[in-house]
Amino acid sequence: MALDVEGIILKSFNYGEHHKIVKVLTEQKGVIGVFVQNANKVNTKKSALVQPLTCARFNLNPSHNANSDLYYAYSGEVVEYYLNLKLDYENVAYFYCMIELVLKGMEDEQFSAYVYRMLKNFLDAAENGYCSYLLSLIFQLKMLAVIGIAPVIDHCAVCKGTENILTLSVRQGGLVCANCYQQVEPILIDAPLIPIVRALYKIDVEDLPEIELEEELLKPIEQFLDAYYDAYAGFKLQTKKFINNL
């Protein structure tokens, strides 16, 4: 049965000399594989349909192979190129970090619509000048719940109290008060920074507010997220190596 779907191109692979397979995030079906014939040929319009960080509409046919979940594109058109974003390689790097997180962490289709709308809104925001570094941190915070490793963020993860909150702990899985804090773990997020983390964690991705935060405030949040994903998801984002060298 033919499928008409809009999606964000996450990644592309060469298939033979002239063709490509792309990973596409869709609102209805999550991440799907799409075979685009002759996408590598010179002067073909299909080349635009295989560029990462592009939103496109595809007309697809499913594979005739019962064991394959690959779709075949018989036509398509670009919805948004995001040219302003792509002119800055640092912006692109932060979005590649988000893409890697989607490909590694999103296994359940029930979150497809939420993650698709979030990434689409973030691409639109970055295209209009929103800070891509901040967007990447918000995205990583939001994906914690999608992956199923959300920290306790409203009270102490140990005693459930709300007084004397000292830090956001990787080891103890969330906010920790002064009485429950285990000193074997260094403090990455101290008390003054916790309201900022909570605000970013709960932010409405459909209506992003104007936010201006110094990079020195964001760096500890990034360090916490790196450690948290390593501890609870069991992976490190390879794109971070490139970002750290920028």
Image (cartoon, grey):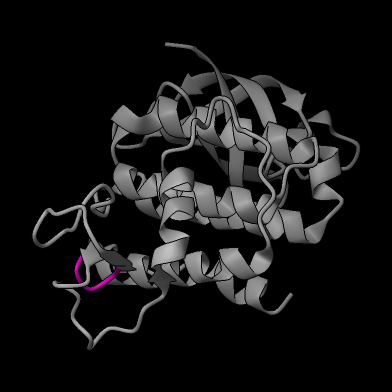
Residue 234 x %, y %: 29, 68
Q: How many marks?
A: 0
- The answer to which of 79 and 126 lies nearer the viewer is 126
Q: Depth check: give the residue in front, 210 or 91.
A: 210
**In this rendering, position of residue 32 left or right of residue 172:** right
Question: Any magenta on residue 177?
Answer: no
For this rendering, which residue is in front, 170 or 54? 170
Residue depicted at x 22% and y 86%: 183
Region rendered in magenta: 169-173
If the image is split into quadrants, where does the C terminus sit? bottom right
Residue ranking furthest to the right = 43
- Residue 69 rendering spot, x and y as whole percentages: 37, 34
Residue 171 is covered by the magenta coloring: yes
Position in image of residue 243 (x %, y %): 65, 70
The quadrant of the image that shows the N terminus is top left
Residue 89 relative to residue 67: left or right: right
Left or right: residue 95 versus residue 111 is right
Given residues 112 and 152, the one toward you in this image is 152
**Which residue appears at 41% of the width and 75% of the height?**
188
| Residue 16 visible (yes or no) | no
Q: Against 224, is 209 above or below?
A: above
Snapshot quadrant of residue 50: top right
View extreme (front): residue: 163
Image height check: is 18 above or below 44? below
Q: Position of residue 81 (x, y in %)?
A: 79, 33
Q: Main secondary structure of the magenta part?
A: loop
Question: What residue is rendered at 65% in x and 73% in y?
Answer: 242
Taking 117 as reference, is 168 above or below it? below
Residue 108 is at least partly visible in this image = yes
Q: Check the image and name the residue furthest to the left.
A: 159
Q: Quadrant of residue 38?
A: top right
